[in-house]
Image (cartoon, rainbow, N blue to C red):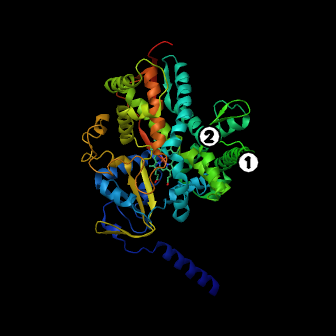
Amino acid sequence: MIWTVVVLIIFIFLIWKALEDEENPLDSLPGPERKPIIGAALRFVNLNTREMFIKLREYHAMYGNRFVVKIFKRRVLHLSNEKDAEVVLSHSKNIKKSKGYTFLSPWLGSGLLLSTGFKWHSRRKILTPTFHFNILKSFLEIIKDKSCDLVKRLEEYRGEEVDLMPVISDFTLYTICETAMGTQLDSDKSAETKEYKMAILQIASLLLNRLTKVWLHNDLIFDQLTVGRKFQKCLKQVHSFAHNVIVERKRQRASGRDYSVVAEDVFGRKKRLAMLDLLLEAEEKNEIDFEGIMDEVNTFMFEGHDTTAVALTFSLMLVAEDDQVQDRIYKELQGIFGDSDRRPTISDVAEMKYLEAVVKETLRLYPSVPFIAREITEDFMLDDLNIKKGSEVVVHIYDLHRRKELFADPEKFQPDRFLNGELKHPYSFVPFSAGPRNCIGQRFAMLEMKCVLSEICRSFRLEPRTKGWRPTLVAEMLLRPNEPIHVKFIKRKQS
Ligand code: HEM
């Protein structure tokens, strides 16, 4: 009897401790009603990602640029103004990603996207030269080839509507795979390569599925279910493929063939510099180990394909809609290339100022990464508000980019705003984030997007399926169209 009472007292004490809540300065901020113990939990029960996206936009309209959602003891501060974004994103210590990213860790390990502290600092230092201008120049060769392949694929539709996302995702996946690992997913027909492509695409969709279903969040439950087992199977395939590519490349380097320059393989095919070669060089200098290389290769594969695929899809949708914009892009390209059908050089791409403004305006309206979430590891001040260690902060890039104080007529697609003068604030436009944890691949991404869009616009006139139509949006880790986007590609001149 006495033991039953003791166990009961301990149980009640533990529950009380778990629910005990200290005062927090964040409670002074507006936000959905905080009921005792549960906070605003009931408002989020059973919401899918689409509904969640709408709800957060509603809260933004109701409570403004700073609001707090409290669920049990967890407080999440939501921000969407440029000054707050600057304080959070430029902080040198608060660089830890929030809990939502943990589902990625079985795939990406402690790669650059997920790591923190000393590991992140040292990896960032090693990887920064991978995106140096001269290296990007050699990656442009791969991007050009893949862009030509895409143009050929679009020609096969003969002006019929194209469902953009799957076609563009193939392009970005093939491009990043060859630049990151030196492997040609499109022309290598081995079963292992095909399996890899399928597994990468499946992992991404299984992860999104998990993110949107609360009951799949627990590892023990997830691992027992069919989805969890499927995820493990894909993960095994992806890891084993990356492992084999790395081992093979290492073997070739050891046998004296240096892949840090453009060389030919035994079949006479051109082998080109890959990010992997630079990582292997770092390994030879003991700066990174094998596991680290695996994590970084997987991270580039993840970060480098879906982000650019959605941005390109939205760009093509907007360009197809707007005849004037399309004419100006074409005119700019004619000015650079005339009637020649030569492929672009790096300085041609630099000259495409209007096209760059089009890409930026697309990323303003449809930032591929719509929000950035941080777990606060060190107290900091937001004006006179003390944000305590343990809180979570979300910077909503989507809402920030639509502030009318920063961008006149914010819903309108107007590339000119990126040609006419300075931005109103350095943190008013941050599609690649900013500060120490900004996107390491942003110059690569801009190069890839400008190169492929220029090739497409030189070859085709674009037409929308329905003028004025816009897809509804979902924001998981990336901002995606909820419905397929269709565009027609009409050949400009017969070859
Ligand atoms: C339109 C294309 C892209 C957009 C909009 C984009 C956006 C971003 C954003 C917003 C972040 C910060 C995420 C956060 O703090 O949670 C980020 C990080 C990162 N991105 Fe990108 N990205 C793009 C393309 C790429 C490409 C092509 C690569 C690689 C080739 C890449 C590699 C990375 C990596 C490794 C990080 C983590 C950096 C770190 O934490 O130090 N991204 N990206």
Q: Which secondary structure, mark 1?
A: helix
Residue pointed to by mark 1: 254
User: Who is closer to the viewer here, 240 or 437?
Assistant: 437
Dot 2 surroundings within 10 Å: few (below 14), some, or many (20 or more)?
few
**Amino acid at dot 1:** Ala
Q: Residue at x 71, y 42 (%)?
A: 257
User: Who is closer to the viewer here, 195 or 131?
Assistant: 131
Does the Cβ of the disc 1 residue fall within 8 Å of ligand 1? no
Res. 226 mark: none
> Quick check: 44 above or below 160?
below
**Amino acid at dot 2:** Val
Instruction: Mark yes or no: residue 483 visible.
Output: no
Instruction: Mark yes or no: residue 76 visible.
Output: yes
- x and y, in percent, of residue 78 in the image: 37, 57
- x and y, in percent, of residue 244 in the image: 72, 45
Dot 1 surroundings within 10 Å: few (below 14), some, or many (20 or more)?
few
Q: Residue at x 55, y 82 (%)?
A: 9
Q: Mark 2 or mark 1, which has the lower sequence index?
A: 1
- x and y, in percent, of residue 250 in the image: 71, 47
Q: Are marks 2 and 1 in contact (CB under 8 Å)?
A: no
Q: Residue at x 64, y 85 (%)?
A: 3
Q: Which secondary structure, mark 2?
A: loop
Q: Quadrant of residue 437?
A: bottom left
Q: Is residue 96 left or right of residue 330?
A: right
Does the Cβ of the disc 2 residue fall within 8 Å of ligand 1? no
Residue pointed to by mark 2: 261
> Quick check: 17 above or below 292?
below
Q: Distance from label 2 to label 1 (Cα)?
A: 15 Å
Quadrant the N terminus occupies: bottom right
Identify the residue at the far top of this view: 494
Q: Quadrant of residue 93?
A: bottom left
